[in-house]
Amino acid sequence: MRTILIHLLWNMLAWLTACSLPSQRDKANLVRIDGSSTVFPITEAITEKFYEANPTYKVVVGVSGTGGGMRKLLRGEIDICNASRPITAEERAQFEQKGIDLMELPIAHDGIVVVVHAQNKWANHIKTTELRRLWQTSAQGEKTLWSDLRAGWPPKPVVLFGAGPSSGTYDFFTAAINGRARSGRGDYAFSENDNILVSGVAGEPNALGYVGYGYFAENNDRLKALAVIDDVNGQSMAVAPSLSNIINGSYTPLSRLQYLYVRREAVEVPAVLAYLRFYNAEVRQMRDLTGFIPLDQPAYDRWLRTLEEAAKGR
Amino acid sequence: MKRPAEKLIEALLQLSGWLTLGITFSVIGVLLVNAWGFFSSIPLLDFLLGTRWTPFSEQQAFGMWPLLLGTLLTALLAMALALPLGLLISIYLSEYANSSWRQVARPALDLLSAIPTVVYGFLALVFVTPALQFFFPGIERFNALSPGLVMGFMILPIITSISEDAMRSVPANLREAAFAMGASRWQVAWRVVLPAAFNGVTAAVILAFSRALGETMIVSIAAGQQPSFTLNPTVAIQTASSYIIQISLGDVSRSGTEYNTIFAVGIGLFVLTFALNNLSYWLRNRFKQIQA
Amino acid sequence: MNRQFIKMFEAFDRFGDWYDRQKRDNFAIYGLVFTLFVVSIVLGLFVYVSIAGFPRLGSRFFSGYASRIPEQAGILPALIGSLWVLVLVFIISFPLGLAAGIQLEKYVTNTRWARLLEVNITNLAGIPSVIYGLLGLQFFVRGMALGESVLGASLTLSLMVLPLVIVSTREALRMVPNSVSEAAYALGATKWQTIWYHALPIAFPGVVSGVLLAISRAIGEAAPLLVIGAVAFVPFSPASIFDYFTVLPVQIFFWATKPQASFLINASAAILVLLSLTLLLNLLAVRIRERWHKRIES
């Protein structure tokens, strides 16, 4: 019995080492992606198809939030960052300081949807002034009631769900609602993972949260979206977060673009180049992803050109 | 006469003995070094006395009480289930049950502790929380009660196995003396065996409590992510360990106060469980000495 | 004054007797009920998960990769990852734990030192798994630059289960009858020869049983791996120990946090697989230990 076990041990050790020696993180075949949870479903869908077509290439996708992804991109730990907000001036400076060239590739429209429980009977639309009242820094520490926001709403505490500090959605939402990015109250349930926010709001009658449009569209049977009246910017019409409203820009201030940020030098890796080409081809014609709002064709043509130029230039 | 090969082997053995100490020092070292970064920029009193934990909002607050209360609340709820149930079961198994029944029950209870904690967390979210919401409609989807109860089942085997061992090792003559004086089985169990096994049982309880404090997955899945200064079991809270997971899942920058919060929280958790574990160990040793 | 106290104590004592008398006859039933209750909860758990997850089990589930469509999402990468981790943890913790156990049980004679080491091991066993995750993050993933790899994860998990292996090695060695070692010494064997050729072969099944239990614990852990940086979407099985990976408990965690009810079915099915694996290891460990006990007793 003992000799059998010892033989087993040695064999396993030998096998593992043999497997490991040739491919120490086979760099040429690896694409490393991380970043926004909002962009994740798009990237995931395309990656699945890519993997079916090219099983020798390996793609890993993390969900650390746009901020987290940009940091990893800066450190060189990943090749592509999913971003649900444009790069900040601060980040741009950091990349310049390190001498890293970035390509900014817009891939989709998106809107941040303010969601409540599906059975919420009292709220159908919300003003941006009310949202600011709810999410601003000075609200921290006190449980805001629905009735504090608008007369006629029930005197129950609003259970808040929102994006986390590494999330691009967080940066964008706080900038749009509170006037400055990353400002606002911190005492709410947060996560970089929109799925957790959806679960939270869907299970709590007094909840209010904000998620990317894709997540709302995917779960519109258990969530209710509120139309937004952008009265901070002088609007008085309630605009619902629909596909057309997001594309034509009337859903303010919560409409935005989604991006991929890629290190220009990463294009030298064959897997990355192949992946990005595939991405461009797929994203134009993606029809089966709920909540995906494509850009117009010229936008995609533009970045395909940028990509090919970078590929030639190496 | 030792051959040189033997000397080499024995040196290697010594090394491995030292390794265990090395692990402890590494843990303490890693926690200290990074927590130092935290505590050198945040005043200790803020951490020890503050009642808000919002390291990432504009108004940063680094008070440890919300996380501490969350951790304690779930652990206490777990003990509320596990302590009475565990005691009763161990008394039953040690004083009443016949050996064939014991042979069935013991492995079944051990099985409870072998179940991975993700499974418990999943069941808490999918089964226990909806059930609780059915009976008590005011409970939020993420709350402390559901994971607390499930944790109680998870730590139950710790209490039953150690307590049962402690009770069964109470010398038979003590029992027999009591029986001879006309005591019933219950009186013997409750008045003679349990007090005699007190140290062992308390050690079991403390160990179970310490385990509940450090438990991560059940609360991460079912308790929510909202540090609140509350002992209300029906609302979402956050424990120290689930905070560490939440931040690890995102990516906070590698240095800086926000990143070091996970080590500050980690060191707090470590100190607490370390103290409790040592207390439990000391009690068990005293129990063994009393036995001898 | 004294008489008041005596009266109080007598009343209390009488209450205690009355209380005991109530308990006396009924406790056997209470105890049985409670124990049955707990045992049935265990069974109910298995039944629930089986019923919930059964529809998903099939060849597509076992051979499929991660996907956003629940019906197509499979556990192949997670299963292979778990097997890799299982093997690696076995390779790392078995020799280390065995060596440390032998050292502590047979070689350390200074009782103060022995006690210190024993306390140390008990402490290690009680450290929460997230803390091991933090250790692994700083030490292996960053310090040794192993990244979020199979090796980094396995090293971390091995450290976590090492105390279990050490404790079971010591207990196994203790079960060896003294007569065996003494006979060996009498014939002129050195300490190491006695251990390796005489005590250890007898204790071996006990050690193996402990290692199997440790491994079953290791493959069920998600917390330390999440701290190390388990990535959400890994659609391939690891090809080397330095490769990205995912394991069953981490996959279950990610599926459990998805709101679509369909993914919960996936999570249940994956739980069934994980539980089967864990149970298999546990049963094997228990079988080995029981047969070993019988042989020693004879």
Image (tube, coloured by chain):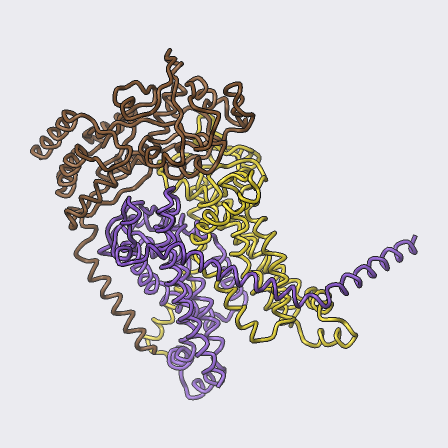
- In this rendering, the answer to whether A268 lies above or below B215 is above
Q: Is residue C156 visible?
A: no
Q: Residue at x 23, y 37 (%)?
A: A288
Tell me residue C187's x, y (percent).
42, 88
Q: Is residue B18 visible?
A: yes
Q: Is residue B283 left or right of residue A38?
A: right
Q: Residue at x 34, y 46 (%)?
A: C229
Tell me residue A309's x, y (percent).
9, 30
- In this rendering, the answer to whether B35 lies above or below C180 is above
Q: Give whichever of C111, B234 is nearer the camera.
A: B234
- In this rendering, the answer to whether A303 lies above or below B276 is above
Q: Give whichever of A117, C82 is nearer the camera.
A: A117
Farthest-out residue, bottom: C187
Q: Which chain is purple?
A: C
Farthest-out residue, left: A312
Q: Which chain is yellow?
A: B
When asked about the image quadrant of residue A216, the answer is: top left
Q: Is residue B183 left or right of residue B30?
A: right
Q: Colour of chain A?
A: brown
Tell me residue B106's x, y (percent).
53, 68
Tell me residue C114's x, y (percent).
51, 66
Number of numbered callouts drawn: 0
When asked about the image quadrant of residue C208, the answer is: bottom left
Quadrant containing the C terminus of chain A is top left
Q: Give whichever of A253, A62 is nearer the camera.
A: A253
Q: Is residue B259 left or right of residue A32?
A: right
Quadrant containing the N terminus of chain A is bottom left
